[in-house]
Image (cartoon, grey):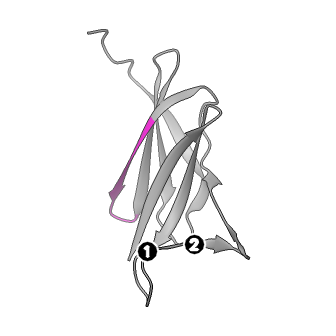
Amino acid sequence: MTKYVSVVCSGQVRVLSVNEAGPNPPTPVANGSNVFWQPVGGPTNVFDATLSVFDASLLVTELTSTGEVWQGVCTSTLPLTVPCTFTQMPTPPNT
């Protein structure tokens, strides 16, 4: 079992793959001996982000500081396959 955790660092989204199986879950997936927060791509002025899993894909939705919304589709693997493929979504209404 795999889950993903995201953070916004300096305007970019990074995702950590976490292994939920094994003797000591949850275990962050490492690249060698270093925990590996992977940059998933997309805009460089991200303000907020959400994650969801659909079939074999991880969906990364990014909201930029200028109000644009982008959705990235990544292959859901352990560790995550990056970069994701991003598409700009319609601009949300100002409410």
Q: What stretch of residues is rendered in magenta?
A: 49-56
- Residue 28 versus residue 39 in the image, above or below: below
Amino acid at pointer 1: Pro
State yes or no: residue 50 in magenta.
yes
**Image quarter (top left, top right, bottom left or bottom right) of the N terminus:** bottom left
Judge from the rendering whether residue 86 lies leftward or rightward of residue 9; answer left or right.
left
Q: Is 22 rendered above or below residue 77?
A: below
Q: Which mark is residue 26?
A: 1
Q: Position of residue 37 (x, y in %)?
A: 62, 57
Residue 67's spot in the image, x, y percent?
Answer: 45, 17
Q: Amino acid at mark 2?
A: Val
Q: In the rendered image, which quarter is residue 44 located in?
A: top right
Instruction: Identify which residue, 83 or 38, lies in the foreground.
Output: 38
The mark found on residue 38 in the picture is none
**Observer-nearest of 12 and 23:** 23
Residue for point 57% across, 72% down: 29
Instruction: Write down the residue under mark 2.
Output: 29
Q: Quadrant of the C terminus?
A: top left
- Among the 4 quarters of the image, the one containing residue 80: bottom right
Q: Secondary structure at mark 2?
A: loop
* Residue 23 lies within the magenta run: no
For image coordinates 52% across by 45% down, the residue present is: 7
In the rendered image, the residue lying farthest to the bottom is 23
- Principal SS element in the magenta part? strand
* Mark 2 vs mark 1, CA separation in Å: 9 Å
Q: Residues within 10 Å of mark 1 (few under 14, many from 20)?
A: some
In the rendered image, residue 33, in percent from the top left (x then y), is placed at: 72, 76
Relative to residue 47, is residue 6 depicted above or below?
Answer: below
- Snapshot quadrant of residue 89: top left
- Disc 1 on helix, strand or loop? loop
Q: Is residue 51 left or right of residue 36?
A: left
Foreground label between 2 and 1: 1
